[in-house]
Image (tube, rainbow, N blue to C red):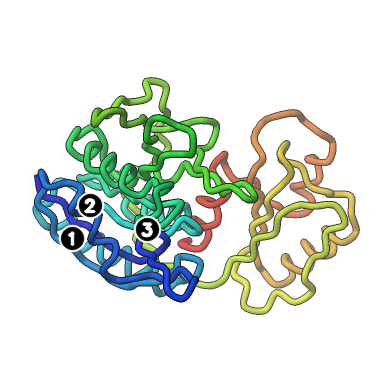
């Protein structure tokens, strides 16, 4: 089996220097030693802490993966940081669609030298998943703390991290499957939402993402903003009766900037939702807020 391993930095590459964790370009290569049964090629388009991820790195990563999909690999594994793992996964899922081979992102909650690290387990499970040949497109292989198995998530299904937690979860529990003792077990109730074909668009312009909270303040100046993403409360609601939201939506409409809402499904028909049309707020189909953000950034 032949796999391309792409290293980008993040905690999974970090080593300690003077009491600080810093990405080490060579450290991630230790992952390869854990799977002597596989022939690996490697690439390292950049080495950063993943909180520094931006348009340049996302585009470079997408270009690197897309170019290597043309080669004769059984799969591609990307070693990534945890902070922005969901964003890269969603971006690649939207850009590549159901690519002919699996592209699997892995990360680590702690550096590889730390006995608490799940980096080796996540990497090995990614290899086992590729060997199973039961998936096309973009995935994430990740073992949450206290779990005895590694979950395989579809890249576009991941929710943002909860505060103070490094756990990864798919929206509505829609995991693709899991790996246990080297064997991939599919989730028989998994529902596929990923498009067959990818998106040919490039990351373009700035998306303003605002999360609902009481006493919300909206910006007056929308210069340079191409679209707005509002993330509603858990029931998909917003304070549509507030003068601040009404003034903001009016400013956006005058500037011809579309306003979208994520987090709103059929749910309960609260009267506050009746004003979405009046405020020119477009309700997006049910998807992870991260995927919604990346989708607007790519549109």
Residue 30: x, y in percent?
A: 24, 58
The answer to whether marks 1 and 2 mark residues whose Cβ atoms lie closer than 8 Å is yes
Q: Nearer the viewer, mark 3 or mark 2?
A: 3
Q: Identify the residue at horizontal 75%, vertical 52% (top origin).
A: 212
Return the residue at label 1: 68
Q: Identify the residue at horizontal 62%, vertical 78% (top origin).
A: 224
Q: Which of disc 2 and disc 3 is earlier in sequence?
A: 3
Q: Identify the residue at horizontal 36%, vertical 43% (top origin).
A: 141
Provide the secondary structure element on which disc 3 rests.
Answer: helix
Q: Nearer the viewer, residue 120 or 69?
A: 120
Q: Which of disc 2 and disc 1 is earlier in sequence?
A: 1
The answer to which quarter of the image holds residue 263 is top right
Circle on res. 264: none
The answer to whether marks 3 and 1 mark residues whose Cβ atoms lie closer than 8 Å is no
Circle on res. 12: 3
Q: Which of disc 1 and disc 3 is earlier in sequence?
A: 3
Q: Residue furthest top?
A: 188
Residue 112: x, y in percent?
A: 35, 55
Classify mark 2: residues with Cα within 10 Å, few (<14), some (14-19) or many (20+): many
The answer to which quarter of the image holds residue 64 is bottom left
Q: Nearer the viewer, mark 1 or mark 2?
A: 2
Q: Nearer the viewer, residue 27 or 220?
A: 27
Say which quadrant the N terminus sits in. Answer: top left
Q: Identify the residue at horizontal 40%, vertical 74% (top origin).
A: 56
Residue 108 in the figure: left or right of residue 236 = left
Residue 101: x, y in percent?
A: 20, 45
Callout count:
3
Circle on res. 76: 2
């Amino acid at each position: 089996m032949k796999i391309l391993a792409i290293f980008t930095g993040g905690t999974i590459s970090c080593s300690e220097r003077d009491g600080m964790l810093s990405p080490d370009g060579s450290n991630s290569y230790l992952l390869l030693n854990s799977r002597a049964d596989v022939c690996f090629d490697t690439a390292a388009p950049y080495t950063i802490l993943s909180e520094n991820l931006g348009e340049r790195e996302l585009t470079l990563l997408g270009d690197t993966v897309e170019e290597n999909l043309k080669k004769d690999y059984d799969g591609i594994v990307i070693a990534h940081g945890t902070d922005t793992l969901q964003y890269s996964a969603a971006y690649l899922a939207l850009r590549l669609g159901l690519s002919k081979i699996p592209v699997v992102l892995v990360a680590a909650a702690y550096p590889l030298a730390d006995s608490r690290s799940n980096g080796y387990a996540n990497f090995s499970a990614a290899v086992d998943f590729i060997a199973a040949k039961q998936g096309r497109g973009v995935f994430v292989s990740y073992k949450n703390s206290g779990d005895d198995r590694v979950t395989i998530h579809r890249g576009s299904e991941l929710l943002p991290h909860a505060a103070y937690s490094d756990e990864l979860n798919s929206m509505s529990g829609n995991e693709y499957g899991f790996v246990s003792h080297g064997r991939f077990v599919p989730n028989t109730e998994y529902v596929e939402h990923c498009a067959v074909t990818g998106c040919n668009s490039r990351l373009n312009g700035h998306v303003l993402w605002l999360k609902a909270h009481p006493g919300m303040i909206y910006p007056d100046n929308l210069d340079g903003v191409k679209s707005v993403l509002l993330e509603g409360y858990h029931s998909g609601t917003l304070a549509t009766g507030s003068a601040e939201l009404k003034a903001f939506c009016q400013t956006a409409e005058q500037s011809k900037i579309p306003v979208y809402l994520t987090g709103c499904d059929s749910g309960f028909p609260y009267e506050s939702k009746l004003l979405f049309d009046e405020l020119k707020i477009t309700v997006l189909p049910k998807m992870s807020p991260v995927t919604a953000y990346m989708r607007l950034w790519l549109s």
